[in-house]
Amino acid sequence: MTSARQVLPAVRPIVWTIAGSDSGGGAGIQADLATMSDLDTHACSVISAVTAQSSVTVSLVEAVSAQMLSSQLNTLVTDLPPDAIKIGLLADQRQIALLALWLRDQQDIWLKAGVKVPVILDPVMVATCGDALANGGALDFTPFKGLLTLITPNVSELEVLAGHCLDDVGACITAAKKLADVLATSVLAKGGDRGPSWCQHQANDLLVCRDVNGISAKHQWQSFWLSSIREASGNNHGTGCTLSSAIAAVMAHGFVLNDAVVVAKAYVSAGLRGSYQPGKGAGCLARTAWPRELSLFPYIKQVTQQDPLPAALINNALSRTGKLKGFKKIDEALGLYPVVADVALLEMLLKAGAKTLQLRIKDTKEQALKEQSLEQQIIQAIALGRDYQARVFINDHWQLAIKHQAYGVHLGQEDLIESNLKQLDDADIALGLSSHSYFEILLAKQHNPSYIAFGHIFPTTTKVMPSKPQGLAKLARYVSLMKGELPIVAIGGIDASRLASVKATGVDDIAVVRAVTESDDPAAAFKALAQAWLEES
Ligand SMILES: Cc1ncc(COP(=O)(O)OP(=O)(O)O)c(N)n1
Ligand SMILES: Cc1nc(C(=O)O)sc1CCOP(=O)(O)O
Ligand SMILES: [Mg+2]
């Protein structure tokens, strides 16, 4: 199997950290560079301040001059332009003003060139040992309004930014949403530093999505709790720096914000597990490369008015099972999985030997004008599946699938919100779920489906997608996370010319529309592709 590293582009994306030096090596620029490099990016540094710091004390903070700050920015930008920027410690209000002005001008230039550079701000004010880092403690970050992709305050920092104490979860949600509006940015409010009201054995972070590029419309402007079992480590110096640097690094690889946040959270959990204590104070995180272990990733729960609290995780296994018993297991390989829009073609492919198929009827109005109603076609497809002992999945129409006892149903993330998974589970119907990111893979996995589809890998004309094509490097990363958990299917733009490169990622199965349906001889196209997929090593 090809590793993600083997299909990574040869050139590392460039990430800048604009932050302070921590002479103790656990946080600040030092933590940022280590993180960014560990996550396969090239890291550049713009130093805002030099701190004389150990793991127990901060004895001196000296801001660099305005000239030095601008000079670093301007020197880098022509030769090493960033794919993402992380901003950490800014020593005083003048530095905030200077950087905001520089970013505003630069973003205009980038925008004209069609480039959007993600900017992640970690509003550092106090070191882990409790000593103030920024001049005067509280800083005003409003000059950054409209310039940020994400701000990542911990609860103490959110309290400073909100100007009052946040005693409970509700107050925290309100403050995070308000900050999102004030700065026109998404917010990650980190609960890692909070005790009882945040649940002591869990690290609950709140992600408020605001105008996020490339995610499902149903996740836009929504808030999510991201919960992990708390790693019992006092070695948490530099945790915030590591998290924000990791978010910037993952975004520099072209992942959407929500993905960067869950990968970075997993990276921090792994770092805490392997943390160490070089001095007498809080130690620092291990650098453990791109996370590939599912148990490191957070449990995601959408915040709703009826249920605003984070999920209560007893342990990862229980939380991941939830209320559903888990959908039907598919023991055989799905193989080449054609997705078709009519029953005649479905029957033709069954005759040609297809064992997994999907009936995907999207235009129900047009269908109603045809001789057969949607329901009749679904009844027929289910019956044909039984006759040929094949796994026929019904796309979208889950009530009809239950009514006529289909083998399986395929649903997208958007469909999930409107459908009743409990009824499907009770009816013992197999469930396939779509995903287009790490975030959606985690959401899908939480339902214990029968398979997960990753898409769209290559450009497709079959449907309009809100996300960009994933490409092979991302597919390989998803596969390395999910391999062996359940069958994983790649979909989108796959044809004979791409079989070898897709197979090399280690994905289990492939689903295709046009490669079969647009052929002059769909049965022959199916047979040839299925054979080629089987033979590809
Ligand atoms: C195997 C497979 N993967 C993905 C999809 C897409 O499902 P969904 O996101 O619900 O989009 P629509 O197909 O409903 O447009 C699929 N159908 N099959
Ligand atoms: C139906 C569908 N779902 C996708 C997803 O990514 O969820 S991509 C897709 C279309 C795949 O068609 P083709 O093989 O013709 O490119
Ligand atoms: Mg759908």
Image (cartoon, helix red, strand yellow):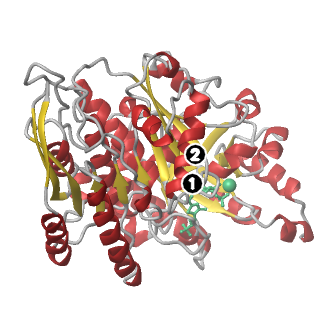
Q: Nearer the viewer, residue 521 or 496?
A: 496
Tell me: 402 left or right of 92.
right
Q: Between marks 2 and 1, how big is the CA–CA gap? A: 6 Å
Q: Nearer the viewer, residue 144 or 134?
A: 134
Q: Position of residue 283 (x, y in %)?
A: 16, 25
In the image as oriented, which residue stretches furthest toward the front?
A: 136
Instruction: Tell me whether circle 2 and circle 1 mark residues in contact (CB < 8 Å).
Output: yes
SS of the residue at dot 1?
Answer: helix
Residue annotated with mark 2: 177
Query: Quadrant for ligand 2?
Result: bottom right
Q: Is residue 127 above or below residue 16?
A: above
Q: Position of residue 371 (x, y in %)?
A: 92, 68
Dot label at residue 441 = none
Residue 329 visible, this angle: no
Please state which amino acid type lies under the numbered disc 2.
Answer: Lys
Q: Quadrant of the C terminus?
A: bottom left
Q: Nearer the viewer, residue 362 or 58?
A: 58
Please state which amino acid type lies under the numbered disc 1.
Answer: Asp
Q: Which residue occupies 48% across, 15% down? A: 196
Q: Is residue 510 above or below residue 269?
A: below
Residue annotated with mark 1: 181
Q: Which residue occupies 79% across, 38% down? A: 405
Residue 363 figure quarter: bottom right
Residue 430 figure quarter: top right
Q: Which residue occupies 70% across, 65% down? A: 345
Q: Is disc 2's CB within 8 Å of ligand 1?
A: no
Mark 1 is surrounded, within 10 Å at the Cα level, by few (under 14), some (14 to 19) or many (20 or more) other residues, namely: some
Q: Is residue 96 above or below residue 271?
A: below
Q: How many marks?
A: 2
Residue 52 figure quarter: top left
